[in-house]
Amino acid sequence: MPGTSARPVGRGRDGRVRLRFDGWIAGIGTSSGTRMVLGLWARSPFGPFSDVMLERKDGHRVLLAPSAQTARFVAGTYVFDEVRVVPVGVEAGRGGWSVAAPPLDLRFVTGGRGPMGLLLRAVPGRLAARPAWAVLVAPAARALLGVRTHGSAGAGRYEWYGAKDLRPVTGARAVYEGEDLGSLAPVEPPVRFGFGSTPRRPCLVSVTTTVAVEANRQGTPAR
């Protein structure tokens, strides 16, 4: 998904800076017990980038990020046991998605949009991206998908997730550090990177994520 300019940085009523990230999140489980969350951000304060959050069966949490700057920001928002700065390449096409982020090689395919995807697509994009909308739909998201759409994050930050589309992931294969992680499986138990997880059923979600940070702790590029 190509990206161009970043969303402008705004400010909330509480005085905190609000940063917007537009892109896709894929939540994938494997039969080995390893669960992965891919973020593909077409527009962000850092420009286009992708990152992978990975939790092993033993609970070890790893962040794979493409630069020291993005690694600092993501690791400041979520919790990891290990942070690696590595190239993260993502290709999306009709044949599926491929992710190369040494030591991870991930490939997955998605199915047709279901009722939930159609419902999300019916909401105007500008409305879905607003933090107030994420708060309004939070009870339904928790009941239907088992996810939270807003909550406190690390370093005094606060996040809102505005979903705009959803497609099921129907197949996946992954290799991590030379180990085949097995076949596609539910994202279970939930990943423990932050206040929320992804849906139990593997899926790909179009989303606008808004992060409120203290003005002197943004970690964003100098303007």
Image: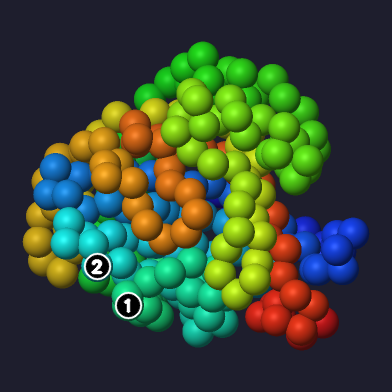
Q: Are marks 2 and 1 in contact (CB under 8 Å)?
A: yes
The residue at 39%/29% (across/down) is 168
Q: Secondary structure at mark 2?
A: loop
Q: Nearer the viewer, residue 165 or 87?
A: 165
Quadrant in the rendering for residue 206? top right
At a point 52% along the width and 32% down the height, the residue shown is: 142
Tell me the quarter of the image containing the C terminus: bottom right
Type of amino acid under label 1: Glu
Q: Looking at the image, which residue is at 23% across and 62% down?
A: 59
Left or right: residue 185 compared with residue 73: left
* Residue 26 visible, this orientation: no
Could you say where residue 105 lies in the image, as x and y percent from the top left? Answer: 25, 59
The quarter of the displayed image where residue 82 is located: bottom left
The span from disc 2 to disc 1 (Cα, nearest Å) is 8 Å
Instruction: Determine which quarter of the picture holds residue 118.
Output: top right
> Between residues 147 and 83, which one lies in front from this camera angle?
147
Mark 2, Cα crowd under 10 Å, few <14 / some 14-19 / many 20+, is few
Q: Amino acid at mark 2?
A: His
Q: Which residue is mark 1?
A: 82
> Disc 2 or 1, which lies upstream in sequence?
2
- In depth, the one of 15 and 53 nearer the eye is 15
Name which residue lies at 72% across and 32% down. 136
| Residue under numbered circle 2 | 60
Task: Rate crowding at label 1 as few (under 14), some (14 to 19) or many (20 or more) other CA atoms within 10 Å.
Answer: few
In screen coordinates, is 87 left or right of 212?
A: left
